[in-house]
Image (cartoon, rainbow, N blue to C red):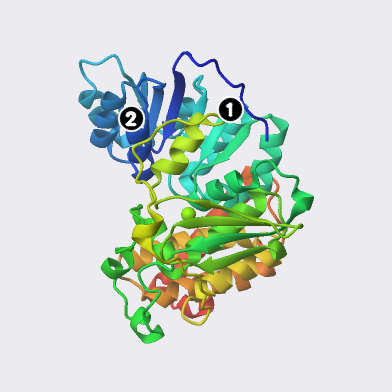
């Protein structure tokens, strides 16, 4: 990774672009920026489908440019920004334009595959990218890491586990690392029986005990698919082979990631479960800044516990590990099928365990065809993504009678 220059103590504010400004990470980023006493200024914000929320974020942060992904929301965005100097635009190209404006750092926090193109654009321009979107690396990890190297871009991990591991690695050479472990809280169902999880409602799955996150990642967390996606992310980010990656359940969410070195030393990243910690770390890196993040009080917590993951009650994690170990295009397939299945669960069309079964079915189907090769470009990855989504959606329509082929 190429690091940015250490700035002087008295410095100009660093300019920030926030892709996904209206989501959970975007809002936490705004909190960190507000608490940083003018260390940052916001150049541009981008959002998905909510013009009012985007206009509100742009005004609040004093951005110069606001881009909405949904072209149909342009008039409403323009109206909501009337009387300000903030330029407005809408559509996929507008979001890419936002990503490409000059800035010290781009926070890539658009949820889902929608984040792939704008994040890739920022990376291709050689920017420092604080990566909060998991899907970029799960869907197109090879293409992203190659492009980051070619354009001398810097990728900083915002995801709490990867940020903790990045800090715990401390720049150590990879050949001194025996193993990297990501922790998982276990989510709301960790103490539930398999029969109870099978009947879980979206409301129950959305009630995460430790983290406040968007709906997609919260559902992923409830089934431990989130940890599977994070293993793929870690494999690409740290260039470590899947056999040296593991997961432990740690319900307190205090230790986020551990690095086991060849001399027997273990370093770990600890913090209260608050996304302002990794966001603040990325925004200021390689310096540090004060944030209003929750502070860790170990004596108040008393005990830190660690358990093995349970693949019987949480089959999504096993499916994801299999996809990562098989490699080829399976992580791309898994990511696409999972997004469709999670939407279906949130819309009450399928029960909870169908998510993992649909993803596994999509991976099995893909092995002989579109998933047989790891996509080397963004275009290839997005083509696989499109095809798997279409196939999964079709299978989910009961009238097609195709559902059984995916299950
Ligand atoms: Mg995480």
Q: Is mark 1 within 8 Å of ligand 1?
A: no
Depicted 133 relative to depicted 387: above or below: above
Residue 210 visible here: no
The answer to which of 84 and 164 lies nearer the viewer is 164
Q: Which residue is mark 2?
A: 35
Asked if 377 appears above or below 342 in the picture, the reply is above
Mark 2 residue crowding within 10 angstroms, few (<14) / some (14–19) / many (20+): some
Disc 2 is placed on an element classified as: loop
36 to the left or right of 382: left
Q: Which numbered mark, 2 or 1, is in the foreground of this view?
A: 2
Q: Between marks 2 and 1, how big is the CA–CA gap?
A: 24 Å
| Nearer the observer, 284 or 153 | 284
Query: Left or right of 258: which side holds 20?
Result: left
Q: Position of residue 208 (x, y in %)?
A: 33, 62
Q: Residue furthest bottom?
A: 195
Q: Quadrant of residue 340?
A: bottom left
Residue under pointer 1: 127
- Give the percent coordinates (x, y) of residue 315: 51, 76
Q: Quadrant of the N terminus?
A: top right
Residue 181, image x and y in percent? 60, 61
Query: Residue at (26%, 67%) from the top-left corner?
Result: 203
Question: Is 210 in front, or is 370?
Answer: 210
């Amino acid at each position: 990774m190429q690091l940015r220059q250490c700035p002087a103590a008295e410095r100009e504010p660093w300019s920030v672009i926030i892709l996904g400004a209206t989501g959970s990470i975007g809002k936490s980023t705004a909190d960190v920026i507000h608490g940083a006493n003018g260390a940052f200024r916001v150049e541009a914000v981008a959002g998905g489908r909510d013009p009012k929320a985007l206009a509100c974020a742009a005004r609040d942060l004093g951005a110069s440019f606001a881009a909405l992904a949904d072209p149909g929301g342009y008039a409403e965005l323009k109206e909501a920004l009337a009387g300000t100097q903030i330029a407005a635009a809408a559509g996929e190209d507008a979001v890419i334009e936002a990503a490409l404006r000059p800035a010290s750092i781009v926070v890539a926090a658009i949820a889902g595959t929608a984040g792939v193109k704008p994040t890739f654009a920022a990376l291709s321009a050689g920017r420092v990218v604080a990566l909060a979107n998991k899907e970029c690396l799960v869907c197109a990890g090879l293409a992203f890491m190659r492009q980051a190297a070619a354009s001398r871009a810097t990728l900083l991990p915002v995801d709490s586990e990867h940020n903790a591991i990045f800090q715990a690695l401390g720049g150590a050479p990879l050949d001194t690392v025996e193993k990297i472990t990501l922790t998982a809280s276990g989510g709301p169902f960790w103490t539930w029986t398999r029969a109870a999880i099978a009947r879980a409602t979206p409301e129950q799955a959305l009630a995460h005990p430790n983290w406040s996150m968007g709906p997609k990642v919260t559902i992923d967390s409830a089934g431990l698919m989130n940890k599977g996606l994070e293993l793929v992310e870690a494999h690409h980010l740290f260039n470590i082979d899947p056999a040296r990656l593991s997961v432990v359940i740690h319900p307190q969410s205090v230790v986020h990631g551990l690095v086991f070195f060849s001399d027997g030393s273990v370093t770990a990243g600890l913090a209260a479960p608050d996304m302002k910690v990794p966001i603040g770390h990325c925004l200021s890196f390689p310096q540090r800044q004060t944030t209003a993040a929750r502070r860790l009080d170990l004596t108040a917590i008393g005990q830190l516990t660690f358990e093995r993951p349970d693949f019987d009650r949480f089959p999504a994690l096993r499916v994801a590990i299999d996809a990562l170990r098989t490699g080829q295009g399976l992580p791309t397939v898994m990511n696409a099928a999972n997004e469709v299945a999670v939407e279906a669960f949130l819309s009450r069309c399928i029960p909870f365990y169908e998510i993992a079964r649909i993803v596994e079915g999509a991976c099995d189907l893909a092995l002989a065809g579109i998933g047989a090769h790891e996509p080397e470009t963004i275009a290839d990855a997005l083509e696989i993504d499109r095809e798997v989504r279409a196939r999964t959606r079709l299978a989910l329509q009961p009238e097609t009678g195709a559902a059984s082929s995916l299950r």
